Each structure stands twice: as C-alpha cells, then as structure tokens.
Image (cartoon, helix red, strand yellow):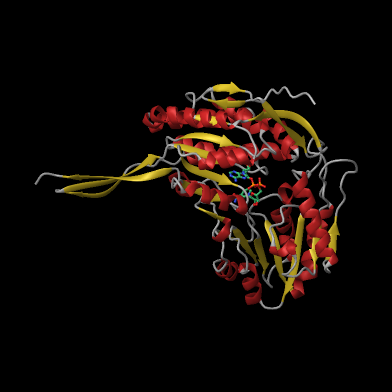
Amino acid sequence: MNTSTPFLMTIGGQRVAAARTLAVVDPATGDPFVAVPECTPDQLDEAVAAAQRAFAGWAATPSDERRRRVEAFIDRVAASADELAPLITREQGKPLPKAKSEINSAVAFARGYAAVKLEPQVLRDTPTQRAELHRRPLGVVAGITAWNYPVLLAMWKIAPALLTGNTMVLKPSPFTPVATLRLGEIAQEFFPPGVLNVVCGGNDIGARLTQHPAVRKVAFTGSVATGKRIMGAAADTLKRLTLELGGNDAGIVLDDADPAAIAADLFWGKFANCGQVCAALKRLYVPRALHDAVCVEMAKVAAKVKVGRGTEEGVDIGPIQNKPQYERVREMVDEAIAQGARIVFRGDVPSGPGYFLPLTILADVTPQMRVVREEVFGPVLGVMAYDDVEEALRQANETEYGLGGSVWGTDIERATALAARLESGGAWVNQHPAMGPDIPFGGIKSSGIGVELGRMGLEEYTSVQVLNVKRPG
Ligand code: NAD
C-alpha cells in the first residue's frame, strides 16, 4: 500500500504529517484504503501547547464573534457533505445516504449548541451587594471519539468547546480518523491557529492526552472500560470530565401494545447503523401473550432490509466497522444459539470479504447469556418473554449500564409511569432512542458522567465564577 496520505493532522494551524502512518481499513472489503499520520508523543505535546497558546486570545474573543465563527464553520461542514459523506462511508461502512444524514444531524446538533447563550446570571442585587454568576472557559479540552459516528461525535465536542471559549485537541478513533482529519483542515479557515487541533493515533496517544497536565477537561465518547481509565488518568490534575459510555438499553413492551404498529420502530431502534449505536435498544422484554407476534412483525420488517456495501444503491445497513467487533458479536450470537436461543430471523449478507453480519433476531434468550448481560454492538436483538411486568422492570434495571430505556404501549400514562422507573439517563415512551439538540443526553451508573447537548451540555464546557461585589454603605 502507498503510505503517502492526503489526510494530515492539524496542529497549531499547520497541516502535519508524521514519521509513521496508520492504515485505515474499509470494513466493506477488509482491506486498507488509506494511510493517516500516527501522531508521536512529541507532536501530541505540541498540539496541546498550540491549544494552550491559542487559549488566551480565543477566550477573550467576544462570545458573539466566537458564535459567528463557529456558525460559519458549521455552515461549511454542511456545504461539505458531498465530500465528507463518502469518507464516512469508506471508513465507517454505513450507506452513503446514512453518512449524509450523519452530517445533517451533526450540523443540526452543532447549531443547537450555537443557539444557546450563557448570559451572566444575577444572583443578588441589593443596596449592599451584587453577586453574578459567570460561565468561564476551562482551557484546553481533549475530545476523544468512537468509531460509530465519527463526524457527529466530533461536532458534539467541537461546537460546545469552541463556543464557550475553550481550545481543543481532538483525537478520533484510529478506526475512523479520515473525515475528522478533514474537519480539522476545514476548520482552519474559521479559527485562529491552535484553537482546534486534530491529531490521529491509537489508544496510547489517547492515554497521553488524558494525562497531560495542561488539559483541563476530557470530553470522551467510547467504552466503559476506557472511560474508567480516563477517569483514573484525569484524577491527578482534577480534570473535568464528560464521559459518554456504552449502554445496554432495555425496551419493555406492555400488554396493550399493538405489535404491527410498533415493529418498525422497535426494529430500527436496534438495527440502525448496524446496531452500532450507544443508545440502541439492546434487550427487549415482551409479555408472553405478545411475544411471538412481536417477533413475527419485526421479522417482516427485517426481511425488507438490505445489508450490503455502503457505496451500493438501495443498501440500508452496512458492515460492522471493525474486525475485533465483528468477531466479538459473532461469538456472542454463536454462544447464545449453543445455549438454546432460537433464531426468529436471520438475514442475508453479501458474499465475499467485509465484516458483514446477518441481521439476527433471537427468541428464548435468558438473562445469563452474554447477548443479554453485555452490550451487543451489532445487528442482533435478543427478545425475552415475561409474565410479570414488575419482574421485567427488575431485569431491565439489573445492569451496570444506564444510558437509555423505553416502554411501549397504547396507554401513554401507564407507559410513562413505568418509564420513569427505568434506571437510565434517557427514558423513552414508544420510541428508542429519542434525542434533540435542545435535549440533554447522557448516561447514569456505568454509562457515563455528565451530559451532552442543550444548555446543560454547553455548561459542561465551562466553570462557574461568582463575581461578588460589596457596595459601599
Ligand atoms: P473505545 O473506548 O475502545 O475507544 C474510544 C476512543 O478512546 C478511541 O478514540 C480510542 O483510541 C480512545 N482510547 C482508547 N483507550 C484509551 C485510553 N486509555 N485513554 C484515552 N483514550 C483511549 O470505544 P470504541 O470501541 O471506539 O467505541 C464503542 C463504544 O463506545 C461502545 O461501548 C459504545 O456504546 C460507546 N459509545 C457511546 C456513546 C455515547 O454517547 N454514550 C456514543 C457512541 C459510542
């Protein structure tokens, strides 16, 4: 493979190569298609130093001017959809129209952040005292992202960090760095050098970034295991953290639900992005009387869905993004079947290479199986029949995770009351997941710390300063 690369890192406003490169694999073929620079420890330190140097000027830039620049950048990302979407398809695997939707969502979410103004708040205004609460930037923020939605996750971090006056060093997943490297280059038109730096490297570079004494906050999306490591690494210098981690979301169908009416939403709640969604529906509890009907209706939806290469017309779902994940999901399914799970639906996959897994709906799964206990980040849904809704709720909550959860039924009040008892950051009724630029999103328990999106998400990139003035007299 030719190791020269058109995709470079951005450090201090410069396009930067590295002594070594990393190969990026196309999951639809299993073959490397491009090489990207592998950041050295010295280059990482330089990126942090560049962000540190840029901080004072950017923090002092009036917030309306920062907003104007961030909005211009977002507009440019929107206008670059035809360039960025094929990169996402190639590195991540999702079909081209879905890659375009990812960019549209990234743009909409970033605009949502830009619409929020964090004005000072007057806490006290008396003849003797005036106390105001101000939101101040933190300094250098490290952004670290996963491989399922590279551009969306990057924009969820760039927009709030820069709007609030921070500077950033962003490190995408080594599995999907390409579109993010382009984002870094595009950004240079809109921001002073060093405000947004994008480096590329493996987990060791991520670890170095989270230990760096000059980094004041880590905004991370990825696995629970890495989140725990980052929390440890951040302890020494007391960095602020936003951790958006994994989930094992449960859905509970109630006995008044109409299987035909909810089947498509249940199906896509699980299988969108080939099941590689943190807040996907990952376990489904159904009343015994409705169990078979729900399975049959979901199988009807599944039968119309085409799995294939993201570049092909008419494909709805692409491959799994990487080989380790492909092997892991395949093993979990084989193990469940060996332990007695029944295949309700198993779809076709294209012949030839690529990390394609068939869409699979399994019945008769048990709480002991890994497909239930662990997060399945792939196109597999386990369905469990229940006799007592309280027992279903108990099982739904019996997990270390707490990202999202859903309840499905026609009596909305009853479904809402049950949803409120889910131990999860998002509790949804007749939908899964449900997100919006103005709605905070985050997990509880091991699914994370803090939230992204909305006013609360923006505030996480700031510290509170109380300006308290004693008045004479
Ligand atoms: P991962 O934790 O392996 O990697 C995520 C990122 O962390 C990568 O950029 C990686 O290089 C970096 N990294 C790895 N080790 C590190 C370390 N010690 N210090 C600093 N950085 C390090 O996760 P993944 O496999 O890329 O992503 C899949 C996981 O992400 C799933 O569990 C999924 O649920 C979760 N996820 C969560 C959300 C959310 O918003 N809650 C969204 C998408 C994905």
Q: Is residue 234 left or right of residue 131?
A: right
Quarter occupied by residue 40: top right
Q: Could one spot residue 317 in this view of the protein?
A: no
Q: Report x, y in % for residue 432.
A: 64, 56
> Residue farthest to the right?
351
Q: Is residue 170 left or right of residue 3?
A: left
Q: Is residue 34 above or below residue 439?
A: above
Q: Position of residue 247 (x, y in %)?
A: 63, 57
Numbered circles on residues, count: 0
Residue 200 in picture, x, y percent from top left: 62, 33
Residue at the spot x=78%, y=38% of the render? 310
Q: Is residue 268 above or below residue 311?
A: below
> In the rendered view, would you say 15 is above or below 439?
above
Tell me residue 285's x, y (percent).
70, 68
Does 371 sit left or right of 402 as displayed?
right
Front in this rendered view, residue 345 or 459: 459
Residue at 86% from the left image edge and 53% from the top image edge: 347
Res. 35 visible in picture = yes
Farthest residue toward the left?
A: 473
Left or right of 70 on screen, residue 60 = left
Identified at 47% across, 29% down, the residue is 49
For the N terminus, the image quarter is top right
